[in-house]
Amino acid sequence: MGVLVGRETRALVQGITGREGSFHTKLMLDYGTRVVAGVTPGKGGQEVHGVPVYDSVREALAEHPEVNASVVFVPARFAKDAV
């Protein structure tokens, strides 16, 4: 089963400040995905492609309760903690 993204999708990008996260966030935005927040521990307060960055998913969700999807771009060793 594929994951469908529609006009009601509000995405959060985990690892948004990294090379892959930043690259794919830009593509997502270019294709019309509504990326409303990003998360990278220690990088809160920044913006990536106009998307606000938070230090934790909890912090991002407190500011953006409309988030209903997450995409993860983190190194393999951090994947378990990110999910």
Image (tube, rainbow, N blue to C red):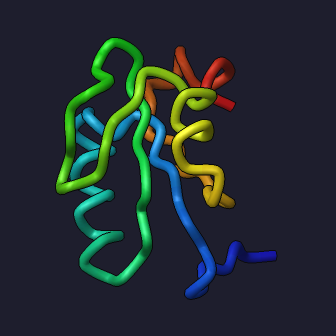
> Count of labels shown?
0
In the picture provided, is 49 more to the left or to the right than 1? left
Horizontal placement of 81 versus 50: left or right?
right
Q: Position of residue 14 (x, y in %)?
A: 47, 38
> Which quadrant is the N terminus positioned in?
bottom right
Residue at 51% across, 50% down: 12
Name, please, the residue furthest toward the bottom: 7
Q: Quadrant of residue 18?
A: top left
Examine the rendered structure and indicate whether residue 54 appears above or below residue 11: above
User: Looking at the figure, which quarter contains the C terminus?
Assistant: top right
Q: Position of residue 41 (x, y in %)?
A: 41, 17
Query: Quarter-wise, where is residue 50 in the image?
Result: bottom left
| Residue 79: % across, % down | 59, 26
Comparing 2 with 52, the one in front is 52
Question: Compared with residue 58, is residue 62 higher up or lower down, i.e. above or below?
Answer: below
* In-image side of 44 versus 79 (left or right): left
Write the residue at 55% across / 66% down: 10
Q: Is residue 12 above or below residue 46?
A: below
User: Which residue ends up furthest to the right in the rendered image?
Assistant: 1
Residue at 60 percent of width and 73 percent of height: 9
Residue 24 position, x and y percent, is: 31, 58
Q: Residue at x 58, y 31 (%)?
A: 57
On screen, residue 5 above or below 41: below
